[in-house]
Amino acid sequence: MIIMSKAIRHFFVYGSLRPDDDSGQSWTKSAVSGLSAQKAKLFNAKLYQEEYACAVLLDSSSSSSSKSSGCDISSSANNYIIGYALSTNDDELFKEKLQLFNEIEGYHYDGSSNNLYDRTVRDVELIPSSTDSSNNNIQARESVKAYVYHRTNQCNREKLIPSGDWLQRER
């Protein structure tokens, strides 16, 4: 059974589901096919390296300086993950991708303790492309609600990716 919210029209992807992923997974190209992609940041989260990328969400209330845009979070403690917001206006395609991503991420909606990744909805900040002509220091940052697959357990936290960017992991 696939339950999805009409209000949620994005996925935040940060590892093997990124359109620019370089880990060579067999599912990447077909999974992102047909979706639009824009670089984005997920605040109040840390990225770890296992066989796959492992996102751990931090308690957003623990960062008193965080705001809805995420812009004011202290840069000294990279508590963000760089990835992409994937979306489509096609309801059927979005539903198909939600089912596919659930399968890839080992997520079972029934609250199963056998989930490899859990899924939640978080605000992600869209990163303007370098071709935007406006001044990014003045421009208000846009945030969207997105499905995020993350770990609540079973994540080996020995290999933090300090930059929050899967493409900058150790090889």
Image (cartoon, grey):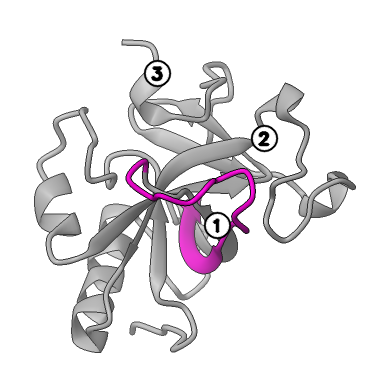
- Rounded to the nearest angstrom, the CA distance separating label 1 from label 3 is 21 Å
Label 1 secondary element: strand
Magenta residues: mostly which secondary structure? loop
Say above or below: 54 vs 106.
above
The residue type indicated by label 1 comes to Val
102 or 77, nearer to the observer: 77
Q: Which residue is mark 2?
A: 79
Question: x and y percent of residue 99 in the render?
Answer: 27, 72
Q: Is residue 153 visible?
A: no
Q: Earlier in the sequence, mark 1 or mark 2?
A: 2
Residue numbers of the magenta segment: 130-151
Question: x and y percent of residue 93 in the render?
Answer: 19, 79
Residue at horizontal 52 percent and vertical 30 percent from the top = 164
Say above or below: 7 vs 151.
below
Q: Which residue is mark 1?
A: 124
The residue type indicated by label 2 comes to Asn
Residue at horizontal 11 percent and vertical 49 percent from the top = 29
- Rounded to the nearest angstrom, the CA distance separating label 3 from label 2 is 16 Å
Tell me the number on the disc at residue 2. none
Say above or below: 169 vs 102.
above
Residue found farthest to the right: 64
Q: Which residue is mark 3?
A: 169
93 or 151, nearer to the observer: 93
- Rounded to the nearest angstrom, the CA distance separating label 1 from label 2 is 13 Å
Say above or below: 161 vs 124.
above
User: Quick check: is 26 in the magenta stretch?
Assistant: no
